[in-house]
Image: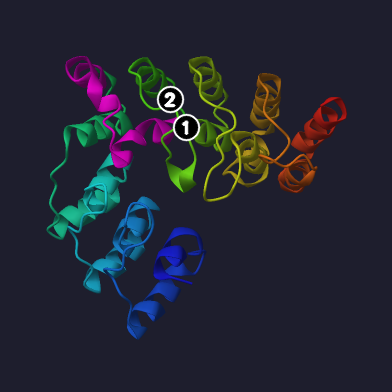
Amino acid sequence: MTLHAFLDTEYGRFGDVRLRSILRKGADLEMRRGPAAETPLHVAVRRCRLQAVKQLVRAGARINALNAYQKTAYAHAARRGFTAIATYLTDQGASTALTEADQLAVAMSSSREAEVRRILSASPHLAHTGNPGEDRLLADMAGRNADWPVQLLIDAQASLTSPGLDGGTPLHQAAWFGQLNHVRSLLAAGAPLEVWCTDHTSSPLGWAVRGSRESGGASSRQEVYTAIVPTFLDAGARLYYVDDDTDAYYRRLLRQASRSVRVLLREAWKTH
C-alpha cells in the first residue's frame, strides 16, 4: 500500500500512530500519484487530516509543492473551508496565494453569499475555468447543506460532470451525502445519471444506495435516501453495469443498501 493510499482511504482510527511508524522507516514525501499528481501532503489536506498534515510537515514535506492543477496544500485547505489546517500551514510559512477561482471557492465555503454573487457577476467564467482543480467546486458544494451555492453554480454554467471527492460528479456527491434538493436541482439542469466514477465504478444511484448505510448520520436520515433512490429510478437510472445485462450491479446494490432502501430496489427490479 502506498503512502498516498494510506492517507486517502486506509487511515482509520489509528492512522496517526501508523503514520508515525511509516515516517520513521522513511517515506518519499515528494512522490506523486493520480491524475492530479498529488504529494502525500496534498492528500492529507484533501482528507482533512490535521495531525497527518503536521506529521508530514515536520518530516520535511515541501509545503508549497504544486499539484498538476497548480494547487498548493494551502489552496486545498482554503478552498474546502478547512480553517484549522489552513491556519497551521500559514503558521508554518505556506504561501497563501490563491487564484480568483480559489477565492470564489473560499467565499462559497465560508457562506459569504453576497461576495460570491459579486465575484460571479464580475467574472462568470470562474464557475468553469477548465482547470479540474477549480471546476470541482460544484461537486464540493453538492455534498453540503446549503442550496444557494449549488443553484448559483448551475445558473453560472458550472460543469455538471467535473469530479470531486472519490471521482464522483456533483450528482454522485449529492447522492452520497443525502442532499435531495441538490439531486433535484442537478437533474433538472441535465446532470447525467449514468456517469460512473473511477474510484468505485459506481453510478450516482450506487452512491445513494451505499450512502444509505455508510454516509455519516445515514441511520437517522433514512427518509432522505428513500426519497433520493426513487428519484433516480424514476429519472431512468439503470440497475445494470454499462454493457452488462446481468443482475451483477443489482446484486451489488442490494448488498450495499440499508434495509429500507433494499426494499425499494427489490420493488424496482420486479418492474424494470
Kindly report the distance in space between the C-alpha atoms of the residues bearing marks 1 and 2: 14 Å
- The circle drawn on residue 47 is none
| SS category of the residue bearing label 1 | helix
**Could you say which is closer to the camera, residue 240 or residue 157?**
240
Q: Earlier in the sequence, mark 1 or mark 2?
A: 2
Q: Residue 163: within the magenta?
A: no
Report x, y in % for residue 87: 21, 51
Q: Residue at x 52, y 30 (%)?
A: 171
Left or right for 189, reference 25: right
Q: Residue furthest bottom?
A: 25
Q: Residue at x 68, y 33 (%)?
A: 222
The vertical placement of 246 against 62, above or below, is above
Q: Are marks 1 and 2 in contact (CB under 8 Å)?
A: no
Asked which colour scheme the image uses, the reply is rainbow
How many numbered dots are placed on residues in this image? Answer: 2
Report x, y in % for residue 18: 45, 75
Which one is closest to the eye, mark 1 or mark 2?
Answer: 1
Give the residue at mark 2. 146
Q: Name the quadrant containing residue 177.
A: top right
Q: Residue 129: within the magenta?
A: yes
Judge the density around disc 1: few (<14), some (14-19), many (≥20) Cα neighbours within 10 Å: many
Magenta residues, dominant SS class: helix
**Could you say which is closer to the camera, residue 242 or residue 99?**
242
Q: Name the quadrant containing residue 92.
A: bottom left
- The circle drawn on residue 170 is 1
First to last magenta residue range: 116-142
Judge the density around disc 2: few (<14), some (14-19), many (≥20) Cα neighbours within 10 Å: some
Amino acid at circle 2: Ala
Amino acid at circle 1: Pro
Q: Name the quadrant containing residue 265.
A: top right
Report x, y in % for residue 57: 24, 67
